[in-house]
Image (cartoon, rainbow, N blue to C red):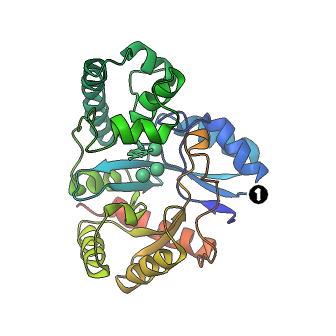
Amino acid sequence: MQNFDFHTHTTASDGSLRPVELIELAARQGITTLAVTDHDTISGLDAACEAGKAMGITVIPGLEISIDFEPGTMHLCGYFIDTTNQALKNGLKIVQEAREKRNPRIIEKLNEMGIDITLEEVNAEVGTSRAGRPHFAKVLLEKGYVNSIQQAFDSYLAKGAPCYVNKMRLKKAEAIALIIASGGIAVLAHPIQLKLSTPVEYRAVFSELKALGASGIEAYSSYHTNQENMLFKSLAEELDMLVTGGSDFHGATKPNVKPGVFGDDVRIDLNRLLKKMNTRTVQSLNQNY
Ligand code: AMP
Ligand code: ZN
Ligand code: FE
Ligand code: FE
């Protein structure tokens, strides 16, 4: 495992550990630099940064924004964002409202299939009205309708399953602009989830993201084989983009994913990477995309 991780979640989105618990776990495991990247929200960052200071861990304030993309899923991580930035707050509010509009429609579809489930039960899982599909899955599991979280997705919630409801997502350019406007840098998360067919296609998307202002690629990911890690690293380097790595740790929500684990042969010099990131954040502040 590595002593750093650029991709982790907390209870602010669909992780199972509270920000302070995540930082405690990271500290116990010898992680010294941790980016907290919850889905479409920055609400866990203040607590995470505070815990990081108390425990001597460098916490990078981040987030992970879902992008409108076919055929697969595109997620962009932002790092070193200014959590007080108003443009970013406004942009995220629009995304969160879209989520809140979607959830009653998922409930309706589940009810139509004869499943006894209410929005209140789902919201109770997360403590806010911003539940995501993993929270629906958890209720289905607890009520005995499925035997695993994965089965809840496969039978009901996944794209293409009977209770799937799409939600409005930001465009690539919008998300990158928001991240840059808040002083941060944008990095494509787990490229394999784009579900493209050839290296040439991946290269084209990386290049497009770079042209829009993105700085890097999460070439190392727990979702990649070692071979895929190598492929994405070489494509990123070819395009002069930063190479990062992250586990996408979610705690009990994804029990097989461990913090700091994203490949067997990770060739990232953390200090060099942080220096380069720092240079790019300064550029972000001086650029108008
Ligand atoms: P949401 O943001 O509400 O659409 O939920 C997205 C989250 O659901 C992702 O971060 C994954 O953790 C999980 N997820 C999405 N699709 C699947 C799937 N097919 N199988 C298992 N988990 C999934
Ligand atoms: Zn997630
Ligand atoms: Fe993701
Ligand atoms: Fe993630």
Residue that appears at 63% across and 62% down: 261
Left or right: 88 in relation to 208: right
Location of residue 224 with respect to 92 vertically, above or below = below
Q: x and y percent of residue 139 in the render? A: 48, 24
Does 142 sit above or below residue 283? above
| Quadrant of residue 232 within the rendered picture | bottom left
Look at label 1 and name its amino acid. Gly
Instruction: Please give the name of the residue rendered at 30% of the width and 31% of the height, measured from the top-left corner.
Output: 99
Q: Quadrant of residue 53?
A: top right
Other-residue count near label 1 (Cα within 10 Å), few / some / many at <14 / 14–19 / ≥20: some
At 23% from the left and 59% from the top, the residue drawn is 71
Q: Which residue is mark 1?
A: 30
Indicate whether 203 appears above or below 103.
below
Q: Is residue 89 left or right of residue 34?
A: left
Residue 40 in view, yes or no:
no
- Res 40 → quadrant: top left
Residue 83 position, x and y percent, is 44, 41
- Residue in the image at 78% along x and 49% along y: 28
Q: Residue furthest bottom?
A: 238
What is the quadrant of the C terminus in the image? Answer: bottom left
| Quadrant assignment for the N terminus | bottom right
Q: Secondary structure at mark 1?
A: loop
